[in-house]
Amino acid sequence: MLEVIGTDASGLAALAPRALELVRRARLVVAPARLLGPLEPWWHAEQAAGRIAQEQPCPALLASDRPDQIVGPLEQALASGEPAVLLASGDPLWFGIGRLLLQRFPAAQLRFHPAPSSLQLAFARIGRPWQDASWISLHGRDPEPLAAALQKRPAALAVLTDPSRGGAEEARRILAASGLEAAYAVWLCERLGHPEERVQRLAPQAALPTAVDPLHLVLLIAEPPAPPADPAALPLFGLDDGLFLQHDDRPGLMTKREVRIQLLADLELPERGVLWDIGAGVGSVGLEALRLRPGLAGWLLEARGGSAALIAANAERLGVRPAGIHEGRAPDALSALPDPDRVLLGGGGRERAAVLAAVLQRLRPGGVVVIPLATVEALAELRPLLEQAGCRVAVGQHQAWRGAPLADGTRLAPLNPVLVLKGRLSQAAQSAPGCPP
């Protein structure tokens, strides 16, 4: 039987009495080189203390840093029945050597004794529950999965770094490239479990500490972004996604920066008039529209409970004043709004055809409706309604990529593609079917 014992960075000092007894009886000990150095002095100290018989020789020691070189000696030990121990970091079955061992040896010949994983230790050190945490590994992989994971705005994300590819610095660069620096606290956790462990929160834009230990991981913890010191100093539009407050239970469900820019262009915002933002979410598009055109009367509608307070908070952060923020479901809730000149239809779900029909009944002559869509089926459903109403129709498909660091270069990580359906009502809409004067 091969006893596979997990330990933290402090090595033997962290082992429980039962695990230590397995090491005392071992004739072969396999471990990372950093843990082997103290083992022989420990062995002699145990003999001096009477916990190991004086006549019992020190076991054979073998470094596991080259896993391909340990299979043969382990096979010999198992075949001869000699007690063997393999020391591993944390939980050997979580990004550890356990997977390799199970590929080479029958499970019946292996017994695992996990220690707390680095993930558990990291959250314990910052004092945060981790049942809602996600994790991702950068070990030997491209950064695209991390960029994709950040678009979902996880409440907590542990990044298992690869020091050979930049480690913590790479994770921070991807966070910045995603426009989410303001939305996450960054914790650097080094040598967890070792007496010289170091856990610290990194200030945005600050340089990494000198001599970061190769044994480290990064925690990204979502938190409400600090309000801008001066909203007037922000760009008029195209703000970083991380500047907007989000719903705690559905983060990431907002229109991404690149798509917002396109939608604002397609709306052809007039200097004055009425703008409807239906399915406003956190208010990102409608509020940026008001930064561009302060003379517009912006009416934002969102069905989700609690959305009005969130949108109002985002409006205050951006220094704009919507004409109204309503919680309600279209099309019924549209009756309380004045007739629009511009409409962004971002919601509706299964009722989107009925919502668009109600919009077209109210849209003023020369008005524009813009509809971002995720599926071609939705495009096929809604385009005929615009055409039947006498609208001039345009269709676009927009795909954006964000740069993410890859070794010494940059890889482009894609965002989800978006179809944009646009309809412009003619000035002579009085005579168009379905469009009242």
Image (spheres, rainbow, N blue to C red):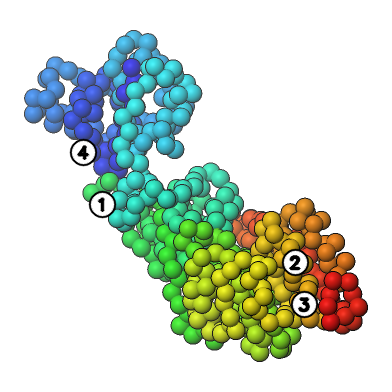
Dot placed on the residue nearer the N-terminal end, 1 or 2: 1
Residue at the (66%, 89%) spot, across then down? 295
Residue at the (30%, 43%) spot, across then down? 9
Quadrant of image for the C terminus: bottom right
Left or right: 237 in relation to 60:
right
> Crowding at label 4, few (<14), some or many (≥20) Cα neighbours within 10 Å?
few
Q: CA distance from mark 3 to mark 1?
A: 67 Å
Q: CA distance from mark 4 to mark 2?
A: 68 Å
Q: Secondary structure at mark 3?
A: loop
Dot placed on the residue nearer the N-terminal end, 1 or 4: 4
Looking at the image, which residue sits at the far left? Answer: 49
Mark 1 sits on what residue?
A: 196
Which label sits on residue 13? 4
Q: Secondary structure at mark 4?
A: helix
> Crowding at label 3, few (<14), some or many (≥20) Cα neighbours within 10 Å?
many
Do the CB atoms of the residues marked 2 and 3 lie less than 8 Å apart?
no
